Image (spheres, rainbow, N blue to C red):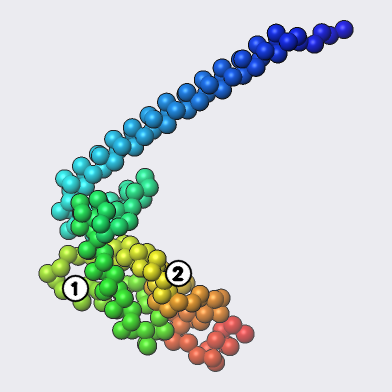
Amino acid sequence: MRRRPGIAGLQRGAQAREHYKSLGEHVQAVKLEHMRSQLAQFKASLEQFAISHREEIRRSPEFRAQFHTMCANIGVDPLASNKGAWAQLLGFGDFYSELGVQVIEACLATRSHNGGMLDLDTLHRMVERRRGSAADPVSRDDLRQAIKKLSVLGGGFQMVKVGGRRMVQSVPKELDRDGATLMDAAQVQGYGSEAHLQAQLG
């Protein structure tokens, strides 16, 4: 016949559980503090990197894209606020605000011709032409960053993929399957007509 644990045994078990719980909380607190310390150290290193490479980040679209990728991988958004530390450090706030305005102007200027769907390469050429040769160069990644910031304002600005092409949508509506099919067909032939779609889709 097996004996049940006595009161002393139950109390020792409860004390052991309480001890392990306290020890676990202490270990967790130490790990959390260590992670906070590492994150603060990493942020300081990233800021120092940004300061020492500021001109290259501003001048080179490729370097800027790599910097954005590095920041995104660690959860830092240098475009989070025009008044944030990153905007002051690198001048990104003004650059991307200006670029956003140029994107809006190009999209509005062509909306009557393309229905609010502008090819990213075409947008890039238009913005480069508008900025002139004296301005800092702009990459497609810069345009994507500016459009991402515009999308929070509403108004339909977003990147969409149609077929194999990246398009900037500047109208506040979803591109449904029929619209995407029409865009694919127009992409192949350069235009879309009812007769062409009936022949192609059956």
Q: Nearer the viewer, residue 153 or 121?
A: 153
**Tag 1: amino acid:** Arg
Q: Position of residue 135 (x, y in %)?
A: 15, 68
Q: Nearer the viewer, residue 84 or 156?
A: 84
Give the crowd class for mark 1: few <14, some 14-19, many >=20 residues within 10 Å: some
Q: Nearer the viewer, residue 189 or 46?
A: 46
Can you see residue 31? yes
Which residue is located at x 19 percent, y 65 percent? 137
Which residue is located at x 33 percent, y 32 percent? 37
Q: Residue furthest right?
A: 1
Which residue is located at x 36 percent, y 34 percent? 36
Residue tagged 2? 161
Quadrant into which the C terminus falls = bottom right
Q: Which sits earlier in the primary sequence, circle 1 or circle 2?
A: 1
Determine the secondary structure under disc 2: strand
Q: Quadrant of residue 171?
A: bottom left
Q: Quadrant of residue 108?
A: bottom left
- Of tags 1 and 2, the one toward the viewer is 1
Can you see residue 184? no
Determine the secondary structure under disc 1: helix
Which residue is located at x 30 percent, y 57 percent? 81
In the displayed structure, 141 sits above or below 5; it is below
Quadrant into which the N terminus falls = top right
Please report contact status of discs 1 and 2: CB closer than 8 Å, yes or no: no
Q: CA distance from mark 1 to mark 2?
A: 26 Å
User: Is 135 on the left or on the right of 125, as rendered?
Assistant: left
